[in-house]
Image (cartoon, helix red, strand yellow):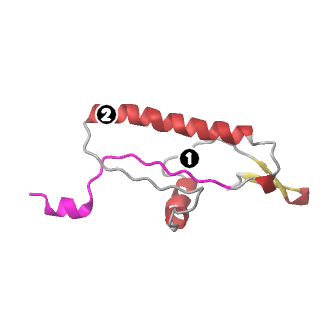
Amino acid sequence: MHIAELLPGDRIRLRVARDFDWLPGGLIWQFFLAQGLHDFLASRFSGEDESLEFIHRMLIAPAVVPLKVELRRLRARMAALHAEAVDVPLRQKHGTGLLLALREWEPEVFTARRR
């Protein structure tokens, strides 16, 4: 995908911005859905540095707007924390995934029973 360049001493240089966005339907998006999502969710999320939160509520359409603003704010905060650690040696850092998803949704089992 040409997102990184291998340098001497097993170092890498990113060829994309550190805070790039996935293209909807793009290669990284497709890879994540096919390979990464299942792997990411294959945890009990019981460690001190882990958390899995899921909330389902009935909302009206205008309520989604402030939620999306808040999700963008959280994404920006994570990018800022990453930028603060950019000069910290790699051995002191660990990859951290944050999955936030928001969409209109009804469990299939409910949809099947809807009259």
Quickly name the residue at label 2: 63
For residue 113: magenta? yes
Quickly name the residue at label 1: 22
Disc 1 residue type?
A: Trp
**Image spot of residue 31 (x, y percent):** 55, 61
Pick whichever, 75 or 12, lies toward us. 75
Left or right, 105 with reference to 14 = left
Residue at x 58%, y 53% (from the top left corner)? 97
Q: Main secondary structure of the magenta part?
A: loop
Q: Quadrant of residue 110?
A: bottom left
Q: Earlier in the sequence, mark 1 or mark 2?
A: 1
| Callouts 1 and 2 close, C-beta under 8 Å | no
From which residue to which does the magenta span run? 95-115
Disc 2 residue type?
A: Ala
Q: Vertically, is 83 above or below 104?
A: above
Q: Residues within 10 Å of mark 1 (few under 14, many from 20)?
A: few
**Image spot of residue 114 (x, y percent):** 13, 58
Pick whichever, 107 or 22, lies toward us. 107
Residue placed farthest to the front in the image? 48
Element assignment for label 1 = loop
Residue at x 26%, y 54% (from the top left corner)? 106
Q: Vertically, is 17 above or below 110?
A: above
For residue 78: magenta? no
Left or right, 31 with reference to 108 = right
Element assignment for label 2 = helix
The residues tagged by marks 1 and 2 sit, at their Cα atoms, a distance apart of 25 Å
**Image spot of residue 19 (x, y percent):** 64, 41
Pick whichever, 5 or 112, lies toward us. 112
Left or right, 89 with reference to 16 = right
What label does residue 6 carry, if any? none
